[in-house]
Image (cartoon, rainbow, N blue to C red):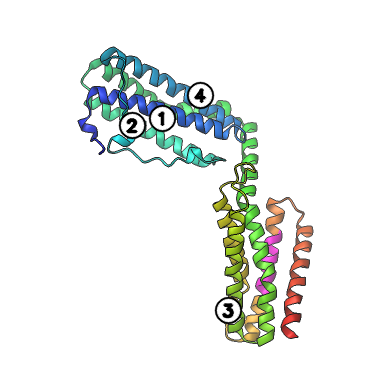
Amino acid sequence: MAKAFKDLSDREILALAISLEEEDQRIYADFADGLRETYPATAQMFDEMQKEESGHRAALIDQYRERFGEHIPLIRRQDVKGFITRKPMWLVRPLGIANVRKQAEVMELETRQFYDRAIQQVSDASTRKLLGDLAEVERRHYQQAENLEKKLLTAEARRGEETAGRKLFVLQVVQPGLAGLMDGSVSTLAPVFAAAFATHNAGDALRVGLAASLGAGISMGFAEALSDDGSLTGRGHPWVRGLASGVMTAAGGIGHTLPFFISNFRVAMTLAVIVVAIELIAISFIRNKYMDTPFLNATFEVVVGGVLVFITGIVIGSS
């Protein structure tokens, strides 16, 4: 059973404050460790914040010893009502820079509010003064964090971190998503258009296209998710990659399948061919933007493959 904050004694409030500062200190250390390889300047900023939290904890421990002795009871945030439940995102590797900074802001705000409430409840003058000083430090922490960012995150460091972040985004999201889009857009061409030319019935082509697209999406999603856990390759969480790959595979196939909702076969076929052209151009654009492939080269490679699969479907469907 969690205890209400208003029911805590001075001793318990000090013990809780020590626990909170220790937890924040260790989380900042985890942030720094998780960001050091990709975002070294931001990691250094969290090193500085971790040292500051360590100083807060030491001051609280001195105050506790002076009033209550050596034994500090273990009172954690989850033992007291009103605290935010923190998701252990600092354990995920690699860390997302935007999520880390957002989490740090939430942590500082929560700690500041804790000290403001604790001051109103504690009776001892020296303890009230210490808590007030720490609350004031937390209020200044935003400004200190900004100063640290200006000092450590120089324009060159920011450019380096943006480049590293872009590489991570490409590795974890764009690559599996692009692989799925190419597979869905190209591999489903043959069954969809084979069914269309074999039956000259839009409904039959629609059913084959939906089955092929969704089946390919599920298959690609699981294949990507189970390929590796990302711990050694740095490719990120496997289920995120699997979701990106599966969704884009299904989307690539469904795109040129949707026109067959139109009952008029000729109209549906014309729209489907137009959609295929748009899909192939989109793939070429993504490869050019994120994979640094020259646009003409990317277009040639994708179009050649797409046309060959398209012709295969027409030949088999017409035979």
Residue 282 shown in magenta:
yes
Most foreground residue, 240 or 38: 240
Helix, strand or loop under label 1:
helix
The residue to which callout 4 is attached is 48
Image coordinates of residue 160 in percent, x first then y, are 65, 36
Q: Residues within 10 Å of mark 2 (few under 14, many from 20)?
A: some
Most foreground residue, 285 or 186: 186
Image coordinates of residue 235 in percent, x first then y, are 62, 46
Quadrant location, the C terminus = bottom right
Residue kind at label 3, given as amino acid type: Arg
Residues in magenta, as a range: 274-284
Please report contact status of discs 1 and 2: CB closer than 8 Å, yes or no.
yes
The residue to which callout 1 is attached is 23
The residue to which callout 3 is attached is 207
Helix, strand or loop under label 3:
helix
Among numbered discs 4 and 1, the one appearing first in the sequence: 1
Residue kind at label 4, given as amino acid type: Glu
Circle nearer the viewer, 4 or 2? 2
Q: Residues within 10 Å of mark 4 (few under 14, many from 20)?
A: some
Residue kind at label 2, given as amino acid type: Arg
